[in-house]
Image (cartoon, helix red, strand yellow):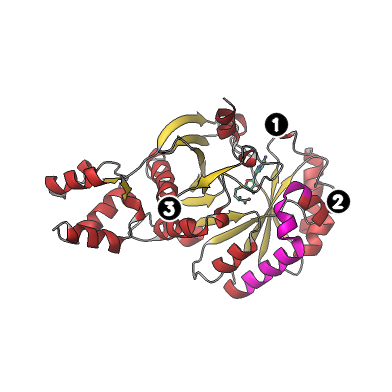
Amino acid sequence: MQDIKELSLKELEDKLFSLGNPKYYARDIFRWIYQKGALDFNRISSLPATLREKLSAEFRITGLTLADKQVSSDRTVKFLFELVDKNRVEAVIIPAPGRVTGCISSQAGCKFACNFCASGLKGFKRNLSAGEILEQVLYLKNASGGKLTHIVFMGTGEPLDNYDNVLKAVRLINSPQGFNIGARRITISTCGIIPGIKRLQDEDLQIELSISLHSAQDKVRSRLMPVNNKYPLGELMKCCREYTAKTNRQITFEYILIRDLNADLAAAQSLAAWLKDLKLAKINLIPANAVAELKISPPGRAQINTFKTYLSKAGLTVTLRRERGQDISAACGQLRLKYEKN
Ligand code: SAH
């Protein structure tokens, strides 16, 4: 059965026309799915019953089923979804004052095997289609009572390794006929896929870019993130400078602080040295989520503060991410991992 979310408004108009119906029904269908969260064509009361039947026979609106759900005491909710082929992906709702962020996956599994991240532990399964990315948004939107304001591609997978499907989904998330979430409220997070960042800078989309940096020393970064062997720091930073020059957009550098690995003063100095001449950069420090399988843990409060203070004094913009969902295996891929092991 075809996924209706793979169709653009224009393609749906043409499809309806070929079925002998007026094109304007396409806008109704879009409004019902993306704005009102309809998961069943029979809810779309403005369509004739015969058309609803035809659509139900030919298309599905969603193929997701919920496999597990965990609710944190801080109201973060983590979902494990099963796709039509039984692959599983995670998505999270993170409520905060004035905003509700949906964190979604772009791939089942991940190729990049960062050694602090649970997502890569079981290897790569496959890319998600644009429709499968969108139905996570649809689910989260409904689950949050329609309140979703921001989307981050920080679930399982590497979005820039599934470029076309991710961009197709981003356009629909952003489109006024789609989810109508402002581009500046959509963040793509990457482990540093240079060709993808280069393509992104030519898209003419005001979306946010996050780079998972985690170390500014090649030796350490290659150990943490094997992708650094392919796209080392020097080339990555050059690419980031080009990106900001071209787009005039700020890049956020994510930096997980991991005990005994990348959180000492020398590490902070390297980071400041790489970023000081990069205009429009922000550093987001994240105390590592402990992942038992990977033997990683966060440094102590004092070391985190020393690290942060050093960067601020060096003139960099730095924030410390509030830890959310600590009680519900919130770190990337942990809920999925629990099931993959069973
Ligand atoms: N592949 C993309 C998006 C997925 S990871 C990327 O690398 O950016 C999303 C974020 O979660 C990244 O910044 C990643 O480094 C972080 N993350 C993964 N494992 C974590 C852990 N154990 N603790 C804290 N953050 C983690």
The residue mark sitting in front, 2 or 3, is 3
Residue 122 lies, in percent from the top left, at 62, 37
Residue 21 lies, in percent from the top left, at 14, 58
Q: Is residue 242 visible?
A: yes
Front-most of 278 and 4? Answer: 4
Q: Is residue 279 visible?
A: no
Region of the chain picked out in magenta, as a range: 223-245
Three-letter amino acid code at the position of disc 2: Leu
Query: Dot 3 surroundings within 10 Å: few (below 14), some, or many (20 or more)?
Result: many
The residue that mark 1 highlights is: 293
Q: Are marks 2 and 1 in contact (CB under 8 Å)?
A: no
Give the quadrant of the N terminus. Answer: top left
The residue that mark 2 highlights is: 265
Q: Which secondary structure lies at badge 3? A: helix
Q: Residue at x 45, y 35 (%)?
A: 86
Extreme-bottom residue of the structure: 246
